Amino acid sequence: MRRALAVLLLTVCRLPAQDLPPEVLTLARIRAHVREAVERLPDCTCLETVDRFVKPRGKDPRRLDTVVLQILFSGGNELFASPGDTHWETNPFAFLSSGMMANGLFALHLRSIFLNNQAIIKYHGMESPVGRPEARYDFDMSRMLSGYTVHHAGAAGRVAMHGSFWADPKTYDLRRVEFHAVDIPPELRYSDVSTAITYARVRIGESDVLLPQAADLQTIGTDGLQDRDLIQFTHCQGYRAESKLRFGDANDAEPGPHPVAASLKPEAESMLPPDLRVIIALNDGFDERTAVGSLLEGKVVGTVAQKHKVLVPEGAPVKGRVRRLERYSDDGDYFTVGLEFTEVDTPDANLRFYAELQDLDRLEGVEMALRITRLVPGESGSGRSGHLAWTNVYRERIWTSEVPGVGLFFVRGGHFSLPAGFRTVWRTLAYPRSSVP
């Protein structure tokens, strides 16, 4: 009798979940995916490149500068340093004298929205911004619960949040989060603060982890001044623990890096010298169905040498990922594809790979720069056949925006497939050491 009752109770407990609407079940799985991604996020570092723009009221926007920093996520904290340095700071403003900068992009906002049950979330519907269906949800968070603090004009204040997020309805991976600051305290002198963050899977060690890929931060002051930061996160890698023994009086020790990062070292510290030509052939092909963030593996074609010394032997394994894959149909079907290679293994060391794309296999439809033709109706005229309508033909060349260490190109058509053995040609760059105004 007890056994029968237990089975009956188990069946009753399962019924409500079966009756839930599909969008509610999808939301629960998205939240579970994000929770797992945040809680399993390993110690890792990325190169953060920030293009900063300013637009005074009534004037055109102008580029202010470009800031390059190293960002380290460790123990739930975000730390910052000049590239190649080991002195970490908790505040990115320690490297700047003016302008706008943001932190909390790795996990702070994800915790508030998905993990702490502080957001009111409503299903909006399905959307396909880049040719793939995504489930959109809108959310709101009060000023008291958001944990979102804005600093400006010598003042600081907590704000509420209103925004949306998009996720893959099949894998439940988060794709994008966008939100605006709401109930901004008047002393901050902002009329609007908006943030958009895109996410993708990145291979760290032997795991694929969810990391921010890019961010767009914009503010509008009450005086009409607009600031904009376009942020790219590239060349992410894991950090490993390293123990050190120190003898003598601890008080005599020189000041070191932030204690959270003091015992961490990058998995690949050595770099290839700049201006080396490296050809990489893919081990496996990919097509338009490949997800952004998917692991890429390839091998070096030919040897890479400098001053008669072989630095990378032929066939050396290379690792990277699909950085970008977007379909556009406004000017004829075409795809924008981005590849990012980050590591090359040699018999002597695991090396960072930081380079710019120079060329690639020119398969049918594959182009470094896309040429499109636009037909624009012109003025009418008359001739022997009566009233004639002329058409103006404009030919434009579309270039992709530059992302440090990422190779971007185009593929024409509504579908594409790049085969195994597809080759890309790269020129190694000097890894940025510091680029702070």
Image: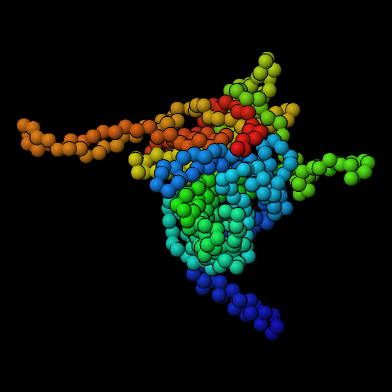
Residue 52: image location, x then y, percent = 53, 42
Q: Residue at x 54, y 48 (%)?
A: 215
- Between residue 73 and residue 99, name the one nearer to us: 99
- The residue lying at 63 percent from left, 40 percent from top is 69
Left or right, 73 with respect to 59, comes to right
Up/down of 141 relative to 348, above or below: below
Q: Nearer the viewer, residue 74 or 267?
A: 74
Is residue 223 left or right of 345 when viewed as pictured? left
Residue 323 visible in rendering = no
Query: In the rendered image, which quarter contains the C terminus?
Result: top right
Q: Can you tell which quarter of the image residue 433 is in? A: top right
With 46 as the anchor, is 141 left or right in this view?
A: left
The percent position of residue 84, horizontal first and vertical second, equals 69, 35
**114 lies above or below 318:** below
In x, y percent, where is residue 290?
51, 44
Q: Position of residue 380 (x, y in %)?
A: 14, 38
